[in-house]
Image: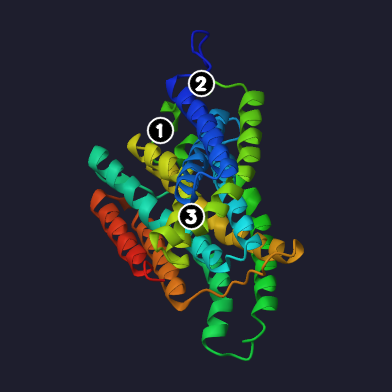
Amino acid sequence: MTTTAEQPTFVRSDLVILGGGGAAVVLAGLSHYLDWGGVPSFVLAAVAVTLLASMVGRSVEQLGDRFGPGATGVLQSALGNLPELFICLFALKAGLVAVVQAALIGSILANLLLVMGIAFVVGGLKHGSQAIDSARARTISVLMLVAVTALVFPSLTSQLHTPAAGHEGALSAIASVVLLVLFALTLPASLKKESSTGMSNDTAETEAPRWPVPLAVGLLALAGLLAAFVSDWFVNALEPAMDSWGVSDAFAGLVIVAIAGNAIENVVGVQLAARNQSDYAFQLIINSPLQIALVLAPALVLLSKLLGFTALTLVFSPLLVVAVFLAVLVAVIITVDGESNWIEGAALIGVYIVVAATFWWG
């Protein structure tokens, strides 16, 4: 598909995202440096992070199918987790280990339960039952289960008081290296171009890219740079906001940080489901938590040691471990079934609300 000469480079939604993102960053910066207060600074920084994430999503979307849907999905998920990477690093620098641990698990839960649930509801109400039976989707689901198993094993050794208990730091480092190697081994298959028949719905109906590659890549770089600054402001305002609202570290990480750091999947995945591109939507939504388990969490474990921040280990609370295992099992079962509907989506959202409420008190 080619763009027409009459097609504008920027449409109204582009201008809203770019203009709104720029304004939000400026306001968040003013609030941070002029000390407008914890809650206003936190809210403005959260809005700025969300809009920057949307800018990343739009830029990757405008790269279109130049790299193939598989590579585009991986790129979108990786860059979509960039704001969360910065937020978690600054949080570790501030010693907020419990927030980071809850945010990592919360990001997986938010994507597999909340975002997927919303996508199923929107797609199901608009188009009825939707197919998600591609081979790539099944592979991603199984790999997600394997990755989470490795991710939470240090927690099990600690909780079960095995001989490895007391060596959780070393075990977390070993597990992190293994997960990163697994990601490197599976990356070539993820980047492989997929034929149009591999999608259950016609992706050829998507809009042709309007932005030239240099513009899309330039905006990606700009969004990443701004995300580093805004994430620092976000974390600085997080503790005062938590104190003002009486929110626990666990709830702040599990819900607030996780949702703010995963804005791309919240928007793009639902849009794809609404356009009846359920396979593509499912791949995008589940690719993000997969990369959290394979890349983000292991990288944070190793970076916290290398940078001299408060050490992060993969020892999560028993309730977080149970919650993430159940969420992954649900995603695998839905994939094996091969289709989704709005009732399943509503059930996923309901489970997420119950899980989030459970951590309100800590």
Q: Quadrant of residue 319?
A: bottom left
Q: Which residue is mark 2?
A: 1
- Mark 1 surroundings: few (<14), some (14-19) or many (≥20) residues within 10 A: few
The Cα atoms of the two marked residues, 3 and 2, are separated by 38 Å
Q: Position of residue 9 (x, y in %)?
A: 53, 17
Q: Nearer the viewer, residue 31 or 316?
A: 31
Tag 3 near tag 2, CB within 8 Å: no
Q: Which residue is mark 3?
A: 257
Q: Secondary structure at mark 3?
A: helix
In the rendered view, would you say 42 is above or below 239? above
Q: Quadrant of residue 248?
A: bottom left
Q: Secondary structure at mark 2?
A: loop
Comes first in the chain, label 3 or label 1? 1
Is residue 286 something that shows in the picture?
yes
Is residue 144 something that shows in the picture?
no
Comes first in the chain, label 2 or label 1? 2
Q: Nearer the viewer, residue 335 or 330?
A: 330
Tag 3 near tag 1, CB within 8 Å: no
The residue under the point 64% across, 51% down is 187
Q: Is residue 329 left or right of residue 339?
A: right
Image disc number at residue 202: 1
Marks 3, 1: nearer the viewer: 3
